[in-house]
Amino acid sequence: MTTDTLSHPAIQGSMNRAQAERLDQYTLWEMLGIWALVALPMALLVWVVAPVIIPYSPFQPGITYWLLIIAGMVWESLVALAITYRELGTLRWSAVRQRTWLQTPRDPKTDQPNPRLYWWVLPPLLFDVLVLAVLGGYLDAPMARLFPALQPPLYTEMSQLATPEFKGQWWILGIALVSIVFNYFLAEEFLWHGVLLPKMRGVFGKYDWVANAVLFGFYHVMKPWNLPSVIVSNLAYSWPARRFRSNWMAVMVHGAEALPVLVGVLAVILGLGTG
């Protein structure tokens, strides 16, 4: 590489970015600590709090469970905000978006933004659909054989909401929208791909996106029967976010999963298929 090449602004920018990434990375214990801060409270809500309060809740069990999940994600969002503020000393959008990669996808070679790279969400999106719609049952089957007593409680199944009592109950759509905002942006995406992923390379090197998918997967200890498929599907979020340093790509792929949720909720409210 010649001196003229090294002096090119794009190359210098890429080198400066690589140098910056090697500095101020999380240690393994810091990552595990953040995981524990959000995963353990969520597991507590699902496995301890839910069974205790559901018999006394004025809501249907599935709604009560859903509200507890939202509460866990609100806590997750607050943790992400607290970490971000501690690191930056501010929550200004300009600073937060750079720290959490909420930016236009960047060329891996030049580090220059390029909106056309958004087309790269399509392969991960198709992979995610393949895992969730086709391969999920096969991936999760060993969990049922290894842990036959580990079965999802009925209140965790969305199908339990498909009853005539919810026909015309539009407030359920409000719950769904709040859940979607936190699930696919303010909580899970913000923490796992915005806060954590940019600072995992110091420990895991070029496989940081794989480690992120595994760590994010084990955050879902509230539904251990789906852990294999969850971990594999998480690869579809972390790879484009890391490859193109754009968390918007992870938001787009992960957020696409909200569409069947919205369709299902609307079907329940409209009384379709509830008898």
Image: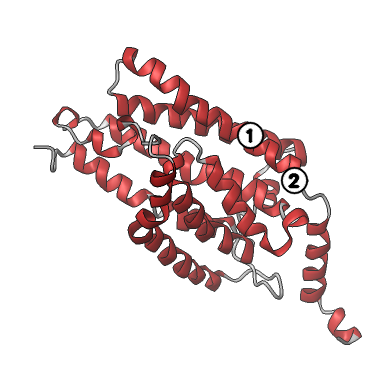
The quarter of the rendered structure image containing the N terminus is bottom right
Element under disc 2 = helix
- Give the percent coordinates (x, y) of residue 129: 38, 61
Residue appearing at x 67%, y 62% in the figure: 207
As rendered, which of 194 and 68 lies closer to the eye? 68
216 left or right, relative to 60: right
Q: Is residue 189 above or below residue 253?
A: above
252 left or right, relative to 17: left
- Give the percent coordinates (x, y) of residue 92: 68, 42
23 left or right, relative to 223: right
CA–CA distance between discs 2 and 1? 12 Å
Residue 218 in sight in this render: yes
Q: Is residue 109 above or below residue 251?
A: below
Residue 91 in sight in this render: no
Q: Amino acid at mark 1?
A: Ala
Q: Which mark is residue 28?
A: 2
Element under disc 1 = helix
